[in-house]
Amino acid sequence: MPNIASTPETKGPARQAASSPSAGPPRHSRRRQEAASAWLFAAPGLALLGLFIAVPFTLALWWSMTNHRLISPLPTSFVGLENYTSILGGGDFWQALGNNVWFVAVVVPVQTAFALGLAVLVNGKLRGRVVFRTIYFLPVVTVMAASAVIWTLLYNPEGLINAVMKAFTFGAFAPDWLNDPRWALISVMIVSMWQGVGFQMIILLAALQDVPGELYEAAALDGAGAWDQFRNVTLPGIRNGLLFVITVTTVLAFRLFDQVWIMPQTPGGPLGATRTMILQMYETGFSKQQVGRGSAVAVIFFVIVLLITVVQRRVVREDGESS
Amino acid sequence: MRRPSATVVQYTIMSVLAVFFLFPLVYMVASSFKTNDAVLSGSGSWRAFLPTPFVGFDNYAAAFSRASFGRVFMNSLIISGGIVGLGLVVNSLLGYALARLRFAGRAVVVGVVIALMIIPFEALAVPLLAMMSSLGQLDTYQVQILPFIANPLFVYLFYTFFLGIPKSIEEAARIDGAGPGRTFVSVIAPLARPAYATMAILGFLFSWAQLLWPVMVTRGIDVRPLPLGIGTFKTTPPVLWGEIMAYAAMMTIPLLIIFLLFQRYFVAGVASSGVKG
């Protein structure tokens, strides 16, 4: 990342040299004029980023150590790490975190493999592959809230999914998906994968198309079969694309909210089976108006996302250094 | 002999997958033309995918009258339009300043913007709610637009795009006496059309789907956007699934049509989001 930031810097002198002989005002005043207009260009964006990201982020860190409430006659007071200890000492948080982790453990490998399979299928030379690619991508364009509502109806105990289940299992398997704590989160996982896999497919498809064709030809000349080619040419070739997809899917899994707010009878139900960290944060910071404690959940959530991102960057960099 | 059969197998797999991705959407449309009873009783068979017994557009009319679909749709248009329209200007200007204009502290600002990309909105929602609440801004359009105009991801998108434009193009404009403002408007922005298209599409997809923030900052129907609209309609008695599916169809189909028309740009935009990192 730092090298990107410094790129224009290294090109600076060359450009300065190129523009200095031009006619017009003296160089220093022209330069000051450019700096002035640069700040003018940057001002709206920087002001908004500061006001709506930097300020609330700083407030989250500060409020997470206070008893600040949304509406309260009492003044806010410093409570140290009390919010953190009470969150980490309560069962709700661990249930929520456990659900997020379970969601990641299932959805990340399954959805990534699924997306890769789809990308390979539509990457071929078959006629009509663009039509199939379009169809696989359609759920991405469907708003998650709408998808969640459609699937709620599909998961009805007497609904379409159970009709299919009954037909295949002769009536033996027909759970009440969203009202059974054993199946509720799995139901949410299925909707999430249905909705999200097309996005990952497109990213992996772009990665696949960047793998040079000569590598396959060389591998074929060496007598490598289709599977060997996939393992030794395709997978290393799309490594960074795969890492990106895995990271994004993991972060998205920790951000899980829409589905678990809309699909169950009560958000996070039944019996907390679909409770997630963000739902926990929403209930604490919004429903109970405990801004301090809700901010602490937000900070914990941010630390998790930060760790995931750092790990991904590190793995990508290792690859860049070894090759 | 082997190749044609492999092709048949591949087509079969691809068709089965197509059914998996399409059936909820077909089911939504079919159900939107049926009464609630017909939706529920027909769910157990293939009749679920037929719009019979057909009730015409009754459910659609009910979504307008019973759930104020028209109002909510307009709210979503205003909010997403505001976020995307203002975002295109603000993010591209900042991206250009960072990529091309010389000023003290530029490298630091670039680093800060990249660092901000890591912070997900969810980590900011609670303190932002408290800020907005104390400013008396709840239940407004601006509370749903302002926080999302400047987006570090899109600033970075424009920044990398502008870095890729050859400097000689700007030098020519400069020698003709154009200042940074004119150079940007008449030379740079037109060249950056692909970056603008990508941001417009991704920004629209993200903002159109938002649920968490509207749940926290809106109460009545006045400024409520579509995702929250369908979420509350689903639990407002009497729960009539034909009407709910009509609501879902009306919030989904316009986007599907836009997608089919501009598919090329969608796919390019999504693919480019994976290039970073």
Image: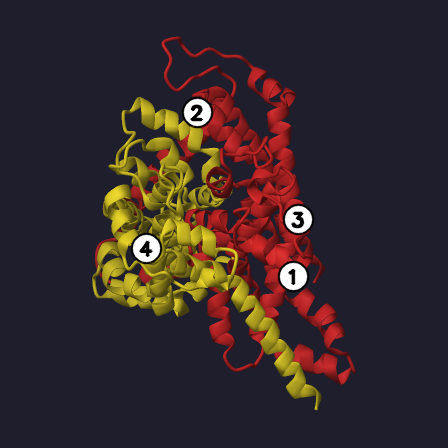
Chain colours: A red, B yellow
Gap between marks 2 and 3, in whole Å? 30 Å
Gap between marks 4 and 3, in whole Å? 32 Å
Q: What element carries label 1?
A: helix
Answer yes or no: are tags 2 and 3 on the same subunit: yes
Q: 10 Å neighbourhood of mark 3: few (<14), some, or many (≥20)?
A: few
Q: Between residue B109 and residue B78, name the one nearer to us.
A: B78
Q: In which quarter of the image is residue A241?
A: bottom right
Circle 3 or circle 1, nearest the eye: 3
Q: Which residue is drawn at 34% across and 64% down?
A: B257
Gap between marks 1 and 4, in whole Å? 40 Å
* Residue type at tag 1: Arg
Q: In which quarter of the image is residue A242?
A: bottom right
Residues at circles 2 and 1 in contact by the CB criterion of under 8 Å? no
Answer yes or no: are tags 3 and 1 on the same subunit: yes
Q: Is mark 3 on a helix, strand or loop?
A: helix
Q: 10 Å neighbourhood of mark 4: few (<14), some, or many (≥20)?
A: some
Question: In this orientation, does residue A232 appear?
Answer: yes
Q: Between residue A228 and residue B179, name the one nearer to us.
A: A228
Gap between marks 4 and 2, in whole Å? 30 Å
Circle 4 or circle 3, nearest the eye: 4
Residue annotated with mark 1: A239
Residue annotated with mark 3: A106
Looking at the image, is mark 3 or mark 1 earlier in the sequence? Answer: 3
* Residue type at tag 4: Met
Q: What element carries label 2?
A: helix
Q: 10 Å neighbourhood of mark 1: few (<14), some, or many (≥20)?
A: some
Residue annotated with mark 2: A287
Looking at the image, is mark 2 or mark 1 earlier in the sequence? Answer: 1
Residue annotated with mark 4: B250
